[in-house]
Structures are given as structure tokens and as C-alpha cells.
């Protein structure tokens, strides 16, 4: 036995009473070394694919092995899983480290309360997660080995398990890589789940006898029969009840009523979402959770739209199986994407890619949800579905009405209350926002639209209403004392209006600029205005901030630092002259902001969306096909000029209200392009 084997394998068939030998080559022994591997090879080779291998292991001891095969399978699986989990938990203790005393020994309790914190145990939330992770990794390894070594049905089953295992392993890799679990403490989460389940069961048993389906159908039919404005009023009333509801139960009831009206009239849901966009900071608390009213209405409207799509697919009788019809719808939707839609898809892709660079993943995920996804959903709702010219103008009317409400509330706040910001010798309006600059950023995008329609609108009524809305908005913009709005945003918007809207607009723009300069004269002696002419104070801080942001961008040129992670990186780059303001969340420049949050792909996305917006917007302006839509186009172009100019020295996109307004401006241009196709020979 020079090689440790005879080169022959004896085969004894007791059923047939025969004896034979196999003489495999040396590669067989290299591949199936050891008695266990060779026995497994012959079991898999000789047994039919339908025979369960666990049955063979107990057949010699149990007369009817099939009766206990299920028990044996479960026992073996559980034993193997628990063994992997326990050894993995031990590995988790090694990875995390254990406290050693002066003798080099350690003591930990066997388990704790399984909540994140300083109370570590041999079995706690982290070590159990590592154990589960180890089990998944070993299962993945075994499935891949079986898929590689076998053929037929066994190979297919192993490949299916291995393919699904990648997703589980990827998710667990992200979770165990964090310093703390991204969920509520286990005890609180379980308590809330049990209470919610019991309450749901009790309410269901209490209300089950009533004919809710018939009543709901009657309410839906009545809501669908309402006019658009009546449906909007009903949805707004339900939203008001939701805002005033005192507790979780009453809030959920009002939310159900709002969902009912949105389900009946998703067009009213879209109108309500557009109205709420400038009012995005307003939110509703459901116990420990809170959502903005804009997010609630947008998600309800999006859910209704997707539900109707699903119903349409289910009702189709042609096109093959359900999954085939679904794929056909998805393929048709992808084929219908145009260049502007691709820009929004690129924004989503860049946001998802940036998560890998995030130091604080939790805040990145929140900004992804409340800013990027919210803006994408608004864009999708505003560009999909049927909408005529009047519907688009109604959306613009609601946007302007929201700006007027925001301005009037700010003026009331300034005149009657003390909820203002007092700094550098002036009282500054902040409205519903935490900072006056945020109010100026929102109104700076809406005021050019108000002024454009007031000057060049096709009807006296709409011109009058937009002009009335522009007056409090202008006063509110002035009283925010936002120097970026005064010196950059509004001048850029007025210049754009003067260039695009004709002589009347140029005269109005010059009059507004002159009035603004006169209004600034009494403020010449205040610190708020005087610091602009000296290289210190806010001016110096802004320059040093840009220097630090540029250095940060050079250190993270490809992927950036992640969504909403500027605050956590800035202390490493802050200049000594800027130490008085260490807690800044963005670089106060639109290019640097997109680059640092989303990397190079975000910078490319910004350029692509701007190019598409201006190319299409100017093409619509040159057509002059519809006076109302032409005035709306001028206002949108002037508003985007304010966005870029003001965003050069301040925030630009990554606030809920700013992202929503950006998405609506782009969506309006896309809609108007459909409503006003170019004439033959035009481009």
C-alpha cells in the first residue's frame, strides 16, 4: 500500500447476492478522500433522486423509516444550525473582545436583556447576530459545494439555496458591520408589536359584524362622483382632522379617512401633495414615530397609483401569465423613459451608491427616504397619469397658494409673536422653518413664478391672484434678511424675468431692484448689512467653509462622504478661523453639496438635469404656443435661476421642501412639453 490504498473497492449487493470490485483512477481518491466522502459519493450515485438521504441513515434501526424521516430531518437541521450559531456566538465574543482582569481572566453573564448598550453578555444581541451570520455563511458554503459536486435535482436545489443565500448574507454583513443595531430596542419593539396585534384583533372582532365592504364601496362611489375641487376639499378636511387628532387611535382613524379620499380621487391627492411641498416641515407624530404631512399624502397617492396599476395587470386576459404581464408593463415603462426621467433615475442610483461611503448610515438612510425618494415620488406622480392643461395650471395655482399661506403666516409671526430670530441688529422672519434662510430659499423659488404670471398671465383673474400672492411673499423675503437671497437669488431671477418676459417685465424688475435698494438704506448701519463689506464675520466663515469643503472633496473624489454626512466629516477639515461654527451640515454651495453627498455621479446628475431643464424650458419659451403655459415657463426658468444663484452660497436641494420644489419644477417642464409638442420643423 505505497499510496495508502489498494486501488480497488469491494461492492457487496445483498439484494442480488453478488460481489464485484471497482477500480477507479487516482483522481477519484483525490476528490473523494476518506471513507465518509466515498460513502457519500456512492449514496448520491446509487439512490434515486426522490429518495431522502436521511431515510437511509435510520433504515437499519427503524422498520418504517419513512414514519420518522421528517423528525430526523428537523432534528438534524436544528442540531446543525444550533451548533453553527453557538460556535458563531463564541466567535462574536472573540471579534468584539472580552474584558480581562489583571490575571488575564474574564467573566461575563451568559445572557443579558438583549438590548443595545454597555451590558454585554456571552449571548447578547451582537453575539447572536454573529452566530446567525456564521450559520448563513456555512450554509452558503455547503450549498455551493453540493452544487459544484453534484448533478440533476440535488444540484438544482443546492443552487437555488445558494442564490437566495447571497441576499441574506449581504443584509447580515451590513447589520453586523454597524456599531449598534439599526432598530428599536428589542423589548420595546416586541412590546409595541404585541400591543398593536392585540388591539388590532380586538377592533377586528368588535367591528366584524358590520358591512364595512358595502359601506366603503358606497363612500368610494360618492367620492368619485365629486368634482375635483370638492374632492380636494374633502381630502384637505381629512388632513386637518389628522393634524388635530389628539392620540394615536384618533390619528389612525383620520389617516384612514384621508386614505379613503385619496384612493377615490388620486388626482386630489396629487394636488394636496403639491400644496404641501413648501410646507414640508409640518409633521404628525404617531407615538414615537413622526412623518411629514407631505410624506403621508405622497405615499398614499403613490400607493393608490401603484394599486391601480396592479389591478389593471390582474384584469388583463392576454399577455401570458401574471409575471409575464407584469414584466411587459415594466418593460413598457422603461421604454417610455426620456432623458429627464433618466436624470431622476441617476439621482436615485447615485444616492444608493453613496450609502457605501456613509460614516453614519442611519442619517443617510433617513435623508434618502425623506429627501431623495420623496422628490422622486413627487416627480413620478406629477409626470405620470392623465393631466390636461387646466390640471397643470391648477397645480401651479396650489403651489402659489401655498407660498402665499407661508408668507402670510410669516408676516403674522413677525408682527404679533416673538417667534423670530433676533441677530445682528435685526428681527428675521423664519415662518415654519428653523432658519430664516430656509424660508428665503423656498419663497425665492416661488416668487418669480408669482411675478411672471402676474405680469404676463393670459387672464385678468389669474394675473390679479398671482399679483396679490406676490406682495406678501416679497415682504416676507425682505424681512428674512437673507443676504444670499437679496444679492444672488432675487437679482438672478429678476434678470431672467427681464430677459424672457419682455419690456413690461424689465420695467417691473428694475422697479423692484430700485425699491429693494431704497429699503436697504435704513439697514446700512446694522451689523447684518455692514459685515458684507468687511472680510470677517459670516463672509470669512463662508470662504473658510468652502476651503474645507474643497479639501474634503479632493479626499473623497469618487463616492463623496455620503448623504447627510458632511456634519460628521467637517470637524476634520474645519479651519481655525471657522471654529465658531463647527456644526454645519452642508458646504453652502450647490456643486460641492452634490459632489460631497453623492460623489462624481451626483455631480454628473446635477449637470444632466440642469441641461435637460434649460434646453426644454427655453424651447417651450420660444414656441409661445399657449400664453398661460408660456407665462408658467418663464416663472419656472426664473425660479431655477434663483435656485442656482442662491444655491451658489447656500443650500440648494437636500432639504425636503427644496428637493420637492426642484422635482416639481422639472416635472412641470416635462408635462408642458407633452402638452405643447413642437410644430413641424421646430425643435
Image: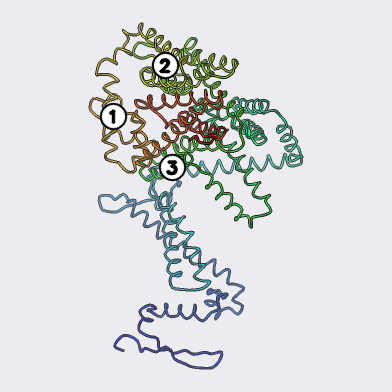
Residue indicated by mark 2: 480
Secondary structure under the numbered disc 2 in the rendered image: loop
Q: Which residue is drawn at the image coordinates 33% and 40% (left, top)?
A: 560
Image position, residue 117 (x, y; %): 40, 42
Report how far apart the C-alphas of labels 3 and 1 lie in the structure. Answer: 26 Å
Q: Residue furthest left?
A: 576
Name the disc covering residue 12, or none.
Answer: none
Image position, residue 355 (x, y; %): 39, 43
Tell which tag, 3 or 2, sits nearer the viewer. Answer: 3
Q: Are marks 2 and 1 in contact (CB under 8 Å)?
A: no
Q: Which residue is drawn at the image coordinates 64% and 41% (left, top)?
A: 200
Residue 496, placed above or below residue 199: above
Residue indicated by mark 1: 546
Q: Which mark is first along the chain, 1 or 3? A: 3
Secondary structure under the numbered disc 3 in the rendered image: helix
Report how far apart the C-alphas of labels 2 and 1 lie in the structure. Answer: 24 Å
Secondary structure under the numbered disc 1 in the rendered image: helix
Q: Which residue lies furthest to the top in this view?
A: 522
Report how far apart the C-alphas of labels 3 and 2 lie in the structure. Answer: 35 Å
Residue indicated by mark 3: 346
Left or right of 438 on screen, residue 252? right
Residue 106, placed above or below residue 307: below
Left or right of 160 on screen, residue 213? right
Q: Which colour scheme is used?
A: rainbow
Amino acid at each position: 500500500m505505497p499510496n495508502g490504498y489498494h486501488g480497488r473497492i469491494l461492492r457487496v449487493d445483498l439484494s442480488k447476492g453478488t460481489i464485484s470490485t471497482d477500480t477507479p483512477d487516482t483522481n477519484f481518491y483525490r476528490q473523494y478522500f476518506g471513507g465518509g466522502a466515498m460513502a457519500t459519493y456512492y449514496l448520491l450515485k446509487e439512490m434515486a433522486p426522490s429518495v431522502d438521504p436521511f431515510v437511509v441513515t435510520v433504515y437499519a434501526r427503524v422498520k418504517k423509516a419513512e414514519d420518522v424521516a421528517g423528525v430526523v430531518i428537523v432534528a438534524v437541521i436544528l442540531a446543525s444550525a444550533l451548533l453553527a450559531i453557538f460556535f458563531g456566538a463564541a466567535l462574536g465574543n472573540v471579534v468584539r473582545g472580552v474584558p480581562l482582569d489583571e490575571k488575564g481572566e474574564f467573566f461575563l453573564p451568559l445572557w443579558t436583556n438583549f438590548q443595545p448598550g454597555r451590558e454585554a453578555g456571552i449571548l447578547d444581541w451582537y453575539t447572536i447576530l454573529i452566530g446567525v451570520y456564521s450559520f448563513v455563511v456555512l450554509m452558503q458554503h455547503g450549498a455551493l459545494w453540493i452544487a459544484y459536486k453534484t448533478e440533476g435535482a440535488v444540484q438544482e436545489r443546492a443552487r437555488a439555496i445558494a442564490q437566495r443565500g447571497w441576499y441574506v448574507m449581504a443584509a447580515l454583513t451590513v447589520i453586523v458591520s454597524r456599531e449598534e443595531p439599526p432598530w428599536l430596542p428589542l423589548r420595546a419593539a416586541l412590546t409595541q408589536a404585541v400591543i398593536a396585534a392585540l388591539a388590532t384583533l380586538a377592533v377586528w372582532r368588535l367591528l366584524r359584524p358590520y358591512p364595512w365592504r358595502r359601506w366603503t364601496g358606497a363612500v368610494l362611489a360618492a367620492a368619485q362622483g365629486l368634482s375635483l375641487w370638492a374632492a380636494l376639499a374633502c381630502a384637505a378636511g381629512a388632513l386637518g382632522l389628522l393634524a388635530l387628532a389628539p392620540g394615536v387611535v384618533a390619528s389612525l382613524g383620520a389617516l384612514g379617512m384621508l386614505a379613503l379620499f385619496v384612493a377615490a380621487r388620486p388626482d386630489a391627492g396629487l394636488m394636496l401633495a403639491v400644496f404641501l411641498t413648501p410646507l414640508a416641515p409640518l409633521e404628525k407624530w404617531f407615538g414615537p414615530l413622526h412623518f411629514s404631512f407631505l410624506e403621508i399624502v405622497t405615499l398614499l397617492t403613490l400607493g393608490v397609483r401603484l394599486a391601480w396599476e396592479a389591478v389593471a395587470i390582474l384584469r388583463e386576459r392576454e399577455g401570458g401569465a401574471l409575471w409575464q404581464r407584469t414584466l411587459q408593463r415594466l418593460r413598457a415603462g422603461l421604454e417610455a423613459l426620456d432623458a429627464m426621467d433618466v436624470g431622476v433615475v441617476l439621482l436615485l442610483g447615485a444616492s444608493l451608491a453613496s450609502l457605501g461611503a456613509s460614516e453614519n448610515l442611519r442619517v443617510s438612510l433617513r435623508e434618502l427616504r425623506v429627501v431623495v425618494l420623496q422628490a422622486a415620488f413627487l416627480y413620478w406622480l406629477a409626470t405620470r397619469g392623465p393631466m390636461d392643461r387646466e390640471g397643470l395650471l391648477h397645480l401651479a395655482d396650489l403651489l402659489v397658494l401655498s407660498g402665499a399661506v407661508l408668507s402670510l403666516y410669516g408676516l403674522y409671526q413677525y408682527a404679533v409673536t416673538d417667534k423670530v430670530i433676533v441677530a445682528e441688529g435685526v428681527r428675521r422672519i423664519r415662518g415654519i422653518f428653523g432658519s430664516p434662510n430656509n424660508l428665503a430659499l423656498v419663497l425665492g423659488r416661488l416668487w418669480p413664478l408669482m411675478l411672471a404670471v402676474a405680469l404676463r398671465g393670459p387672464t385678468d383673474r389669474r394675473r390679479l391672484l398671482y399679483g396679490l400672492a406676490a406682495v406678501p411673499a416679497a415682504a416676507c423675503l425682505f424681512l428674512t434678511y437673507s443676504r444670499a437671497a437679496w444679492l444672488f437669488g432675487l437679482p438672478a431671477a429678476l434678470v431672467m424675468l427681464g430677459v424672457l418676459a419682455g419690456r413690461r417685465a424689465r420695467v417691473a424688475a428694475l422697479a423692484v431692484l430700485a425699491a429693494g435698494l431704497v429699503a436697504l438704506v435704513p439697514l446700512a448701519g446694522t451689523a447684518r448689512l455692514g459685515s458684507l463689506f468687511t472680510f470677517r464675520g459670516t463672509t470669512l466663515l463662508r470662504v473658510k467653509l468652502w476651503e474645507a469643503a474643497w479639501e474634503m472633496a479632493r479626499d473623497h473624489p469618487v463616492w463623496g462622504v455620503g448623504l447627510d454626512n458632511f456634519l460628521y466629516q467637517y470637524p476634520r477639515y474645519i479651519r481655525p478661523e471657522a471654529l465658531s461654527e463647527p456644526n454645519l451640515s452642508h458646504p453652502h454651495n450647490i456643486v460641492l453639496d452634490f459632489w460631497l453627498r453623492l460623489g462624481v455621479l451626483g455631480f454628473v446628475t446635477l449637470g444632466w438635469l440642469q441641461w435637460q431643464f434649460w434646453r426644454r424650458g427655453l424651447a417651450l419659451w420660444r414656441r409661445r404656443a399657449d400664453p398661460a403655459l408660456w407665462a408658467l415657463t418663464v416663472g419656472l426658468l426664473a425660479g431655477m435661476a434663483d435656485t442656482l444663484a442662491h444655491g451658489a452660497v447656500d443650500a440648494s436641494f437636500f432639504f425636503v421642501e427644496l428637493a420637492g420644489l426642484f422635482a416639481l419644477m422639472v416635472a412641470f417642464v416635462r408635462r408642458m412639453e407633452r402638452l405643447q409638442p413642437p410644430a413641424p420643423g421646430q425643435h
